[in-house]
Amino acid sequence: KNSAAEGPELAEPYLREVLGTAGLAVEYVRAEGNTLYRRGEDGGEIPVADFAGGYGSVLLGHNHPDLVACARELLDAGTPVHAQFSRHPYANRLAAELNRIVHRELGSTEPYFAIFANTGAEAVEAAVKHAELDRVLRIAALREELERSADRARAAVAAGEAELPARVRTRFGIPTGAGTAAALAELTARLTAENTARLNRPPLFLALEGGFHGKLGLSVQLTHNAAYRTPFQALAAQARFVPRDRPEVLKEIHAQERGVVHALEVTDGHVDVMEREFPVFCAFLVEPIQGEGGIRVLGAEFAEAIQQFCAETDVPLIVDEIQSGMGRTGTLLASAQTGLVGDYYTLAKTLGGGLAKTSVMLVREARYRREFEIVHSSTFAKDSFSCTIALKVLELLEADGGAGYRRAVERGAALRAVLESVRADFPEVVKEVRGKGLMLGLEFHDQSGSASESVRSLAVSGLFGYFLAGHLLHVHGVRTFPTASAVETLRFEPSVQVSDEEIAQLEAGLRDVCRLLRDGDGTRLAGA
Ligand code: PMP
């Protein structure tokens, strides 16, 4: 609670209250490495082992000394931080370094252009907005082509070189008695009206069930969680959500939604009407490992099916690496390990090293529309402070032949072994351990059928994982959170600095939680 001296509480008091019910409304006053220090009742500091890791933004640890030094140097040197609409050599260096690493991981050479932004959701919005500009420009080119084909048909009829066959007239309800020129004029008017209506359809997105891509106007429509999404449905174009591991649904959706217009064509002295497909699907968004959806790794087969679908239908693939990327799973792009290749990538979180707010979307040259640079910008994006820190982050990951990536894999394996051992000892409580590298999740069995009234009430509260997190924080000095859209799954995304001792501390906490759940002692879990 705020003291009277602090005045009324106006910065999201309700959220603080909800966190408070699970014992999570604590204040952190200092952070270093993998440790956050919370303020104790007596004003002193209580260390907390951080397994939430800034929701993925501090893979290298809180206040990494090299990154802090980099930030200090920039400020001491009086570096101009905000200089929008000027040359940004630091942004260019960062884009080049991202390209170098991405090319190495994908085994490709095609350049990816970089559009910088400030937050994860903003990078997603930039990618989607760029994809829409591309779609609109492709449709504009198609409109011109349709007009040219109508002109060609008109000219052929005027020159007496083409007829409008009865078959075509009947199909489109044009009187068979009318003269060819008049009949063609009527047919063209009809097709143009129909084509225009079809081409003006709003774009459609494809995304996965359980997916999370942000909470802004458009990105929240691509986020599957209905509580986040549905109140804001009227704000943006809609997505069709594809169930995980059911690629056959893609064909169904495509058949239902594909867009077709009619074009006139002259062949062998006849004017005919042909179908032409136009791009209705703006983009397909995929996380290589779903973060907020419960730490679920995209299977290789499903990834392959998505890749193939996108290639066959010419739908651009946006690989959202905002949570999975930046080395967390051992490579800059987690998707590079699955063989998934995106037309677009989004990166954020650890890109700013836990100090700067920055994000980027990368788009491959073949899809790039340079016009986008003129119509999209942000006061804050691409600034020297965040770009230079991001370069330092990449330098730290890449140093010693990629020791940072190897460390993420090694620490991830140590953490995973512990989570697996807890699962093995409490199979009636723990359902599954999932993830890769330092992006791990532990899912509990649904406890709504528990024999214990206190455990049942936790399970149906909608805050199940939050109560467990509160207990882990207060009794075991460990910070973790459930994933946003799957509260039975606790997420573990500590920094590469996480120690064996901290992992042992987490293990003790999880074993305690499992014991309490198994023994039906929900009261102690809710008592944080
Ligand atoms: N995409 C993914 C995959 C994410 O995990 C998140 C954040 N959890 C976002 C987008 C949105 O990022 P931000 O919170 O920085 O807007």
Image (spheres, rainbow, N blue to C red):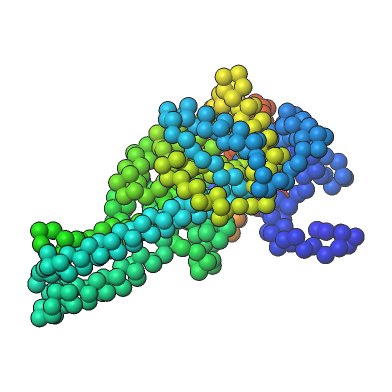
**Which residue, as the protein is rendered here, is positioned at the far top?**
400
Question: Which is nearer the eye, 474 or 37?
Answer: 37
Q: Position of residue 486 (x, y in %)?
A: 52, 51
- Which x, y percent locates residue 31? 76, 37
Q: What is the quadrant of residue 75 in the picture?
A: top right
Q: Residue at x 35, y 42 (%)?
A: 307
Residue 8 in sight = yes
Question: What residue is shown at x 50% (from left), y 51% (from top)?
Answer: 371
318 sits to left or right of 479: left
Residue at image coords 35%, 70%:
197
Q: Is residue 323 above or below residue 193?
A: above
Please, is residue 502 above or below residue 260 in the view?
Answer: above
The image quarter containing residue 512 is top right
Judging depth in this view, the residue of 26 and 31 nearest the camera is 31
Q: Quadrant of the N terminus?
A: bottom right
Image coordinates of residue 452 in percent, x first then y, are 56, 54
- Residue 350 appearing in the image: no
Q: Residue furthest right?
A: 5
Q: Nearer the viewer, residue 262 or 325?
A: 262
Total number of numbered discs in the rendering: 0
Quarter of the image where one finds residue 414: top right
**Residue 525 falls left or right of residue 345:** right
The residue furthest front is 159
**Is 155 displayed left or right of 237 in the figure?**
left
The answer to whether 257 is drawn above or below residue 418 in the figure is: below
Q: Which residue is pictured at 35% across the width and 65% down the height? A: 199
